[in-house]
Image: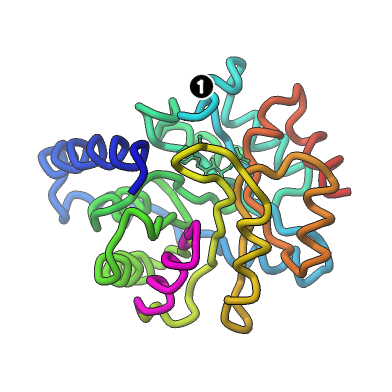
Amino acid sequence: MSDILDKILAVKKDEIGALKKQYSKTALQDLISEQSAPRGFAASLNAKVKAGGAGVIAEIKKASPSKGLIRADFDPAWIANEYAEGGAACLSVLTDVQFFQGHNDYLKAARSACTLPVIRKDFLIDALQIMEARAIGGDCVLLIAAALGKQQLNELHACARELKLDVLVEIHDRAELDQVLDAGLGNEYLLGINNRNLRTFATSLETTLDLLPLLPKGCEVVTESGIAKPDDVARMRDSDVHRFLIGESLMRQPSPGKALKDLIA
Ligand SMILES: O=C(O)c1ccccc1NCC(=O)[C@H](O)[C@H](O)COP(=O)(O)O
């Protein structure tokens, strides 16, 4: 595991301890019962692709461990609308406070501002965090293979599906791909390939391209991180990758929606 993931997961363990003190399972179930049905996250992404477009999960990201502050002028509801108008299929909202300056309230604000489905982007290693994701209005959760064992992956995936959440399972390399394929998740997940090396923070689109021949047929793959230019999008689409998770390059522009439109035109 990388240093940064180690550090993040240590904080997450503390946060889970606090969450357990704050909410019983029943209390979270009560909050969940007040939520409307999740918006179909995978369905929205796949509909764009089926219509011949790029399926973009546009990320609302204020800061990151690799880049520090990315956008000082940060209004999640406004950014959500920009992304919706720019042609995003879905939103990704960072809810981690310590490393990404995110917040659960940002997810709520972004989702309320538009009709797009939203993934809770955080480091989830406990079923209570999955329940919390649903309780704050999330439509999808991220499961990072590098942070989870096979059994944990299986259990958290089952927990999410039971709550009618979609799941984006993220890998960085072949070993993590094997781990996911062995975890027995059926075909009910999107497979994210993260182009960011968590040791160096460098991004390389080759990470996605190199893993493509190893993926099972019919796999719904999302290429994540480091997509910044129309050429990057074209390169992926030429290799039959049509789903994208894009954050920083959009967040740095005055109009993230216009930037998205230009990127996928
Ligand atoms: O972004 C980081 O610095 C980072 C560091 C450590 C773990 C995860 C990290 N990023 C999470 C992500 O997956 C990205 O926010 C997402 O793929 C968008 O990437 P980008 O378009 O490069 O902002």
Question: Which residue sits furthest left?
Answer: 21
Residue 259 in the image: above or below residue 28: above
Image quadrant in which you'd find residue 73: top right
Looking at the image, which residue is at 23% across and 53% down?
Answer: 128
* Residue 257 picture location, percent across and down: 76, 36
Question: Which residue sits furthest top?
Answer: 72
Is residue 56 toward the left or the right of residue 16 in the image?
A: right
* Residue 154 picture location, percent across and down: 31, 72
Image quadrant in which you'd find residue 143: bottom left
Which residues make up the magenta segment?
169-183
Looking at the image, which residue is at 23% across and 51% down?
Answer: 28
What residue type is disc 1 on?
A: Gly
Dot 1 crowding, Cα within 10 Å, few <14, some 14–19, many 20+: few
Q: What sort of colour scheme is used for the picture?
A: rainbow
Please tell me whether residue 200 belongs to the stretch shown in magenta: no
Looking at the image, which residue is at 65% across and 29% down?
Answer: 78
Q: Name the residue beneath numbered marker 1.
A: 68
| In front of the other: 52 or 151 | 151
